Image (tube, rainbow, N blue to C red):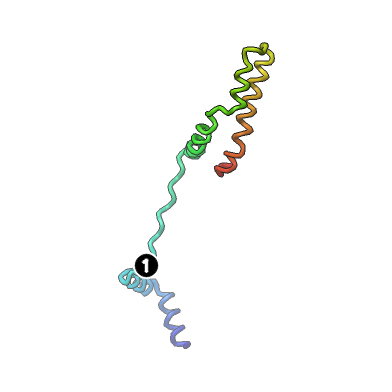
Amino acid sequence: MSELQDTINQILSDPEAMKQVQSLGEQLGLSSPKPPPPPKPEPGNEMMTALGSLAPLMRQMGGDDELSRLLDALRPFLGQERLERLDQAKRLMRLVKMIPLIKDSGLF
């Protein structure tokens, strides 16, 4: 057993012998190919990916629901101050509806 260890140590310490062992391994198909380096992210690429995944969410939010239609139907009967508050309420409703969609999409 010690003779085997001595032989292995001798091969490991000799660079020429190591090259021969590596060459033999490559011929037998035992060499492990080096994985290609990961592509470098382009500036702004992450932002484009995030926006691309948000696009379906935005399309989903584009449709009006019953409450939005009701609020729009009230517009002719409201003064300027209340119209502004109505617009703010509608924007807030859209944001609140988007929270679960964004959470389910895995973006955040």
Q: Label 1: state its secondary structure.
A: loop
Q: Residue furthest left?
A: 27
Q: Quadrant of residue 36?
A: bottom left
Residue at the image position 60 percent from the left and 42 percent from the top: 103
Would residue 106 appear left or right of 81 to someone viewing this image? left
Residue toward you, 82 or 25: 82
Residue at the (62%, 24%) spot, across then down: 90
Quadrant for residue 10, please give it.
bottom left
Q: Residues within 10 Å of mark 1 (few under 14, many from 20)?
A: few
Q: Image point 35% across, 71% down: which residue?
A: 25
The residue carrying mark 1 is 31
Residue 80, compared with residue 24, is above or below; it is above
Q: Position of residue 8 (x, y in %)?
A: 43, 80
Q: Is residue 14 above or below residue 95?
A: below
Question: Looking at the picture, how far across and down is residue 39, in whole percent?
Answer: 43, 47
User: For residue 40, which quarter of the picture?
Assistant: top left
Q: Nearer the viewer, residue 62 or 26?
A: 62
**Label 1 amino acid?**
Ser
The relative height of residue 84 versus residue 30 in the rendered view (above or below) is above
Residue 106 picture location, percent across and down? 56, 44
**Viewer-nearest residue: 104 or 39:** 104
Left or right: 52 as drawn, with respect to 73? left
